[in-house]
Image (spheres, rainbow, N blue to C red):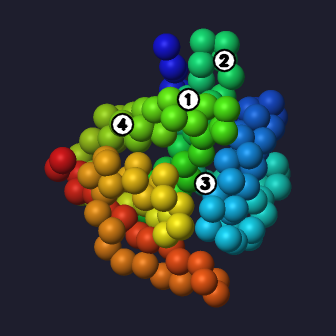
Amino acid sequence: MNTIIKLNLQDDSTVNELWSLQHKAYRLEAELIGFREIPPLMETREMLSHSKEDFYGCFDEDEELMGAIAIEEESPGKLTITRMMVGPDFFRRGIASNLLEYVFEHFPGMEQYIVSTGKLNLPAVSLYSKHGFVPMGSQEVAPGVELIDFYRSGSL
């Protein structure tokens, strides 16, 4: 059984575990979308420990961090999923879906949930579409690198 808890970024071992997971997960996304300068890959452990985002981690029965999600309420009623990461050893086990469902369940009453991902990150595009997110625009963030913005109504 998986357990999801809020992560304490003031705890060094938690930050180290999260930073390691983040680099494993985002390196793969960088390969998928052909862009190595994804902001989480540029982040140091110290930068991560000072993040204003709220992070939630999904742990297995051995207390290993399998995946994490970060959120930020940027304006009242609008919750942005700023990061989604799953360790490669835990792909295809529903970890990302569990993390999304956790956010929907624990942050009800939002008018809108927002997330962005690389257009070429087909697993992420599929995940968000499966969970009721609708593409609402895109932007080129570097030559040949396009991000898609997704929105989901809070009333789903």
Q: Which residue is drawn at 69% across and 62% down?
A: 31
Q: Residue 52 carries which label?
A: 3
Q: In which quarter of the image is residue 12?
A: top right
Camera-nearest label, 3 or 1: 1
Q: Where is residue 135 in the image (x, y as percent from the top left)?
A: 33, 68
Residue beneath label 1, please? 58
Q: Where is residue 59 in the image (x, y as percent from the top left)?
A: 59, 23
Q: Are marks 3 and 2 in contact (CB under 8 Å)?
A: no
Q: In which quarter of the image is residue 29?
A: bottom right
Marks 4/1: CA–CA distance: 12 Å
Residue beneath label 2, please? 63
Marks 3/1: CA–CA distance: 19 Å
Q: Are marks 2 and 1 in contact (CB under 8 Å)?
A: no
Lower sequence index among marks 2 and 4: 2
Residue beneath label 4, please? 101
Amino acid type of the residue that numbered disc 2 sits on in the rendered structure: Glu
Q: Where is residue 99 in the image (x, y as percent from the top left)?
A: 46, 37
Q: Is residue 19 visible?
A: yes
